[in-house]
Amino acid sequence: MALPPPYVTGPLTEHFADEAFAGVDGYVARGGYEVARRAIAERTPAEVIEIVKDSGLQGRGGAGFSTGLKWSFMPTERSGPSYLVCNADESEPGSFKDRLLMERGPHQALEGILIAAWATGAEKTFLYVRGEYAYPANCMERAIGEATSRGYLGENVMGTGFRHEVVLVRGAGAYICGEETGLLESLEGKKGQPRKKPPFPAQVGAFGRPTTVNNLETYSHVPNILRNGADWFRGFGTEKSPGTMLFGVSGHVVRPGLYELPLGTRLDEIVFEHAGGVPGGRKLKGVIPGGASMPILPAGQLDVPMANEFLRERHTSLGTGGVMVMDETTCMVRVACVVAWFFRHESCGQCTQCREGTGWLHRIAQRIERGAGEAGDLEVLADIPGKMEGATICAFADAAAWPIQGLLRHFRPEFEQHLAAHACPLPESFEL
Amino acid sequence: MVSAAAADKDVSILPISEETRARIVAEMEKFPSKRGALLGALRMVQAELGCIAPETARGVAALFDIRPVEVMEVVHFYTMLYDRPHGRHQVFVCTNLSCSLRGGRSLLRALEEHLGVHAGETTADGRIHLGHEECLGACAGAPMMRVDEAYHEGLDAESARQILDGLD
């Protein structure tokens, strides 16, 4: 039921092979909660924020925004409650890292949340776990119960006088609830339709109160940063993208699984050296580096460090670190169909460009794949993404547009072959 | 607006156990506004009644002091909430990219054939609802399926059929 520990561990996952680490005794035996206690007892919120800012930690949920900076947006003078939200609505296709962190390191996540709560002055955290994650949610629920009964959470956190409570909320199946304001709507018992910004969550967040939303992996890095210092964290990764990240590798590789590696590790090293390359002696064709929303890279372009400053030069991004590998048998028009269908299905429907655009992308890709493509289809397929991108309330439309742009950028001749032959030229491809 | 008396009547038509009702009330207290408990309440009610039919939504709406349509729009937005009976067991095969690359769709076809239904349908005896689902965060265990709350990973057609045959 639980995911196995990562093939390659790092500071975030080094104790994950030890099942006791998931329980409060095992966690405390490894020094757990001591960093949070000291932060609350000995440091001001502003000092904690400075350390996290100095560490250069960036959000691990896809957008890569500076965590310390985000925390600093919370108002310091306020006249009512403020909240923290932990986003564990992990739904980006190809991503399964938060699941591991909940199953094998739930107290580490809670300690990171506690430190963030102190830094931002939040009295309560809503931990939003995607609805399908029953086992990870149970792991977190158990950990919250243990931490509360031991006084690590509750009315008087470890005798410091600080009060903090964590409430677990389970989603009910909607990708868009991973978007932070869609999540806030869902948390309030509504459809998860993203909000217009401004106001940003730090001003008007959950239940109308100032709120900080971070991904669960982001919080999980925080205890180590406070324990070892910002410079230690900067010892991993690149200058602009410090630290390690949990990469989930899937698709046509010998060893699909999780790998904790420094940011800046080359993509070809991840695919070939760590994940064992493509099985069966077949050749590699393309890799999506960061979950289904991120544009694909062809086999010749894997010599790129996995950090946004390098990936952006190749018109793609790190996203959630979901590395999806495709071998030479893979039909890229089918890939377009799968990805376009996903976004069509998950569009919340608020904005015309997204609601209609995702449908167009899927219908055209499907028509081409079935050999029923018409003259002009490819031009329309290439034209729609630019009309969706940046035109909507949230970044979902961009996420739907980018993968199609990437497929056409690198594999356009394959689409043309489908149109010319009215058939798929790759009979060995995965079934659609 | 619904009058107080009518609301009481609607609450009383929500045929859930006292225990579930008490759990919903306890859940409401965790949020600054009780509507925060709506998704959780709907899951509890669905677990007990099998689905959130329109008349059920009226009872839930009364409990939350909102309109029935606000409950139904939530039910229709989320894929794990159903407005009609859905079979005793929920079986969903992941067909997103990582699973498709490793045979997710072939697995779904094999199960369609095995059960004699198409994806999105329930077997005639009401035992199993079969569907396909978007990425479930089990990409290293592709192909995989979710049966109710449990994940089954690293499947082939034979092992998946056996799991289904073992369901009551």
Image: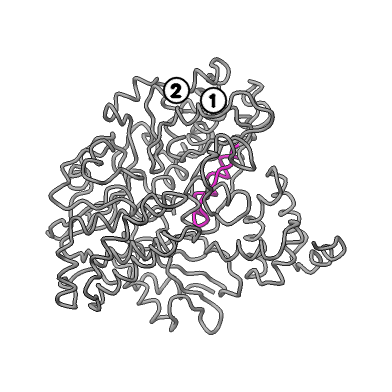
A361 versus A78 height, above or below: below
Name the spot of residue A163 as percent of width and height, x first.
Answer: 65, 28
Q: Nearer the viewer, residue B37 or B147?
A: B37
Which residue type carries mark 2?
Leu
Chain to which mark 2 belongs: A
Mark 2 = which residue? A226
Q: Residues within 10 Å of mark 1 (few under 14, many from 20)?
A: many
Q: Nearer the viewer, mark 2 or mark 1?
A: 1
Mark seen at residue A119 = 1
Asked if residue A142 lies in the magenta stretch, the reply is yes
Q: Residue at x 33, y 30 (%)?
A: A243
Instruction: Tell me, for residue A256, which label it has, or none.
Output: none
Q: Are marks 2 and 1 in contact (CB under 8 Å)?
A: no
Identify the secondary structure beneath mark 1.
helix
Q: Read off the magenta span.
A: A125-144
Q: Quadrant of residue B87?
A: bottom right
Q: Chain of mark 1?
A: A
Q: Is residue A288 left or right of residue A212?
A: left
